[in-house]
Amino acid sequence: MHRRDLASLSALALAALTLAGCPEEPSKPSGGTAATATTAAPPVASVEKPAATQRAEAPKATGQATAAAAPEGKGVIRGVVKFTGKPVEMKVPAARKDAPVCQDKEVPYNAVVVNDGKLKDTFVRIAVGGVPGSWTAPDAHAAVDQQDCMYVPRIQGVVSEQQVDIKNSDRTLHNVHTYKGSETLFNQAQPGGAAPLTKAWKDGIIKLTCDVHPWMRGFVVVTDHPFFAVSGDDGSFAIEKVPAGKYKLEAWHPRYGLKTADVVVADDKPAQVTFTYAGTEPEPAENKDELKGLW
């Protein structure tokens, strides 16, 4: 053959091969190989996203566990609050005689209660932020009741964000007006026998008053840990399960204010602390003029 004939035959053969391959091309998008590759991509992406999320959340979970692990020790702080001066005489508030229901009982006021030189109702705690660790509020609610036109108990402590139920056991209307410093937190009427008012606070000294019966006063002291107590009738107090260490202890009385003491707590021996009030201390800023005009 001539060269021209060979070139023609080659061109014809190449054209035939090209035509033979063309019917196969449309089958690729719907065929198994191409479809598998397209479908496989999303699962790879969806697997990677949860993995990344888990890695990001892991430190948060670890941090929460660490923060919740608060120390519980074996130490005990015991003490007494003494009173060396002449206490203010507690009388029946004059306005009681004009208040329905409240006038039925002559209840002496309780701002200053001293027995044998010991001061009742002094709140004692390790200073805020003074104990390493973090404490969540207990599930159990604290309670404040209005009985005989008085707040009962007069003073108590709660852990930050702990729920407090404010009740009215009297057969009369009270008005729960609470303050933090000079700021009103809430002011709500509460008829006798009504459902409790449930509140919670993050920090501070919360003062409870009543606009209907102005002599009524109570206090809830909020702390970031559970290491606190209130002095009893004999002036004594005890704080238990304290981790060993050095602490600043605070004593706060609504009439005579704040005093502090340093204390060293050990696991095997109770720490002993004495606070002494002379009765000449100025009223604290959180509770000015409580006795003014009562008699």
Image (spheres, rainbow, N blue to C red):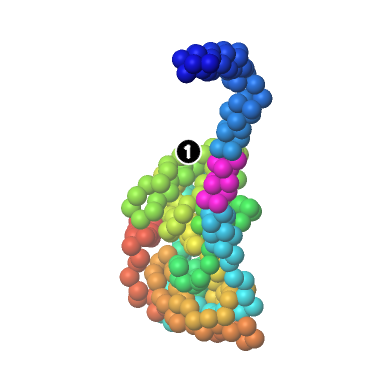
Magenta: main secondary structure = helix
In magenta stretch: residue 55: yes
* 203 and 191: which is toward the camera: 203
* 257 and 265: which is toward the camera: 265
Q: Where is residue 245 in the image (x, y as percent from the top left)?
A: 53, 81
Q: Where is residue 227 in the image (x, y as percent from the top left)?
A: 55, 69
Tell me if I can see residue 149 in this picture.
no
Residue type of the residue flagged with mark 1:
Ala
- Count up the numbered dots: 1
- Name of the residue lying farthest toward the front: 1
* 93 and 7: which is toward the camera: 7
Q: Position of residue 45 (x, y in %)?
A: 55, 37
In the rendered structure, the answer to whether residue 293 lies left or right of residue 269 reads left
In magenta stretch: residue 11: no
In the rendered structure, the answer to whether residue 129 lies left or right of residue 45 reads left
- Name of the residue lying farthest toward the bottom: 269
Residue at image location 64% in from the left, 27% down from the top: 33
Q: In which quarter of the image is the C terminus?
A: bottom left
In terms of secondary structure, where does tag 1 sit? strand
Residue at image location 60% in from the left, 40% down from the top: 47
Q: Name the residue under label 1.
A: 189
Residue at image location 34% in from the left, 50% down from the top: 183
* 73 and 93: which is toward the camera: 73
Q: Where is residue 290 in the image (x, y as percent from the top left)?
A: 38, 59
Q: Quadrant of residue 283?
A: bottom left
Residue at image location 55% in from the left, 51% down from the top: 55
Tell me if I can see residue 284 in this picture.
yes
Extent of the magenta region: 46-56
| Image height of 224 relative to 36, above or below | below
| Image height of 288 relative to 72, above or below | above
Local crowd size for mark 1, using a 10 Å CA cut-off: few (<14), some (14–19), many (≥20): some
